[in-house]
Image (cartoon, helix red, strand yellow):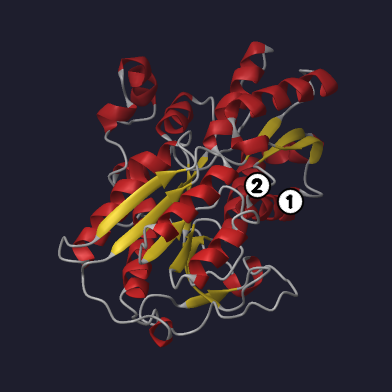
Amino acid sequence: MRRAAVAVATTAMAVSLAACGSAKESDGGSDSSDSAAKKGDDIKVGLLLPENQTARYEKFDKPMIEKKVKELTNNKGEVVYANAKQDASLQNQQVDTMVTNKVDVMIIDAVDYKAIAGSVKKAHDAGIKVVAFDRLAEGPIDAYTSFDNVTVGKTQGEALLKALGDKAKDSQIVMMNGSSTDPNAAQFKEGAHSVLDGKVKIGREYDTKEWKPENANANMEAAISALGKDKIDGVYSANDGMAGGSITALKRAGIADIPVTGQDAELAGVQRIVTGEQYMSVFKSYPKEAETAAEMAVALAKGESLDSIANDKVDSATTKGVPAVIVPVVSLTKDNIKETVIKDGFYTIDEICTDKYKAACDNIGLK
C-alpha cells in the first residue's frame, strides 16, 4: 500500500472516538475465537454500504473490499453486496435478508448509527459477527475501522483559518455540517469547533440532512439571505459534496474567492481545488480502511483473534472495548495533489486535468 507523503497526527482514540453511555452490552471486545467456530476460506461476507451519492462507496470501498476478501481467502470467499441508498429502513431489511441467507460476517456502514442497533443485535443473536465500517454503529458490534473523525474536523478548521489568515478574527463563516444521523458528523463538528470557536465568527450553522449537496445548497441560500452576500468570508463544509452544493449557491449570489473546505477527495472536489473554487479537502486512505475492514471480517468469519490487526479500542453508547483500527488523514490542497491522490492511485493527472481544467492544472504545475 503506497502512503501519502504528508501526514496529520491523530489524537488518542479512547478520548476522541469513544462515546459515553450507560447501556450494559459490553461484549464488543471479547476474543472472537471464543464464540465462532473455526472455518476455512469458503466464507460469505455481507457488505452493506449506506448510499451511492458519494463517489467513494462504489468507486473505492466496494471493489477494494471485494478484492481483499478474495486475496485473504484464496479466491474462495464471497462478498454479498447491498446499498441502502440513504434509507435506514431499507438497510435494516438488508441486514435481515443477510441473516436469513446466513452470511458468516457483515461489514456495515450504517445510514443511521442508532437505527441499525436492532439489526446488529439480530445478527449477533444469529451468531454473525459485525464490523462497523467508517461509522461507529450502535449494537453489539465486534470490530470497527474508520478515520480519526475529530482530527478530520480539526484539519478542516485549521485549513480554513490558514486561508483566512490575519483577517480571521474579523471574518464571518457559515458551517455546513453533516447529517445528524451520522456519528461521524458530530465528531467532525466537534473537531472543527475546537479550532474555530473564538477565532472566527460563525454566522450560520446547519446540520445538513442526509449529507445531500442539494440540501447544502438550500442551506447556503438561506445563509446568504440572512447574512447578506457581502458578509460571508468562508465556508466550513464537512465534505466535498456539500462543498459543491454550497459553492453553487455562492456563485449564483455573485460570491467568489472565499475559502471552502471539504472532505473525501472526490474528483469534482479535487478539480474545484485546482481551479481555486474550493480551498481544500481531506484525503483519507480508503484503500487502507477498506483492506482493514476486509481483514477484520475474514478473521472474524474464521473465528480468529483480532489481536494482530486491531491496536486500539473504542466505546460506543452500547458496546465497550470494541477492537479498532484508526487510519490517519491528510489535508489536501493544490500544493500536494501529486503527493496524495495521484501517488496513491486515486486519480491520474489525465482524469483530473480534462480539457475544462487543463489551463488551471498548468497554472499550478499539475502536468
Identify the residue at image location x=26%, y=35%.
Answer: 348
Q: Position of residue 252 (x, y in %)?
A: 64, 12
- Asked if the residue under mark 1 is in contact with the one under mark 2, i.e. CB atoms within 8 Å, the reply is yes
Q: Quadrant of the C terminus?
A: top left
Q: Quadrant of the N terminus?
A: bottom left
Image quadrant where residue 120 sits: bottom right
The answer to which of 275 and 124 lies nearer the viewer is 124
Q: Secondary structure at mark 1?
A: helix
Compare marks 2 and 1 and give the one earlier in the sequence: 2
Q: Position of residue 82 (x, y in %)?
A: 41, 46
* Furthest-bottom residue in this view: 34
Q: Secondary structure at mark 2?
A: helix
Determine crowd level at label 1: few under 14, some 14-19, many 20+ residues with C-alpha closer than 10 A: some
Image quadrant where residue 296 sits: bottom left
Q: Position of residue 130 (x, y in %)?
A: 46, 66
Left or right: 301 as drawn, with respect to 153: left
Please name the residue that numbered disc 1 is placed on: 193
Left or right: 46 as drawn, with respect to 53: left
Identify the residue at image location x=49%, y=72%.
Answer: 142
Image quadrant where residue 363 sits: top left
Left or right: 335 as drawn, with respect to 28: left
Determine crowd level at label 2: few under 14, some 14-19, many 20+ residues with C-alpha closer than 10 A: many
Q: Amino acid at mark 2?
A: Gly
Identify the residue at image location x=51%, y=26%.
Answer: 276
Q: Using the rendered image of the protein, determine whether residue 61 is visible from the camera's viewpoint.
A: no
Q: Using the rendered image of the protein, determine whether residue 160 is visible from the camera's viewpoint.
A: yes
Identify the residue at image location x=42%, y=87%.
Answer: 34
Q: How many marks?
A: 2
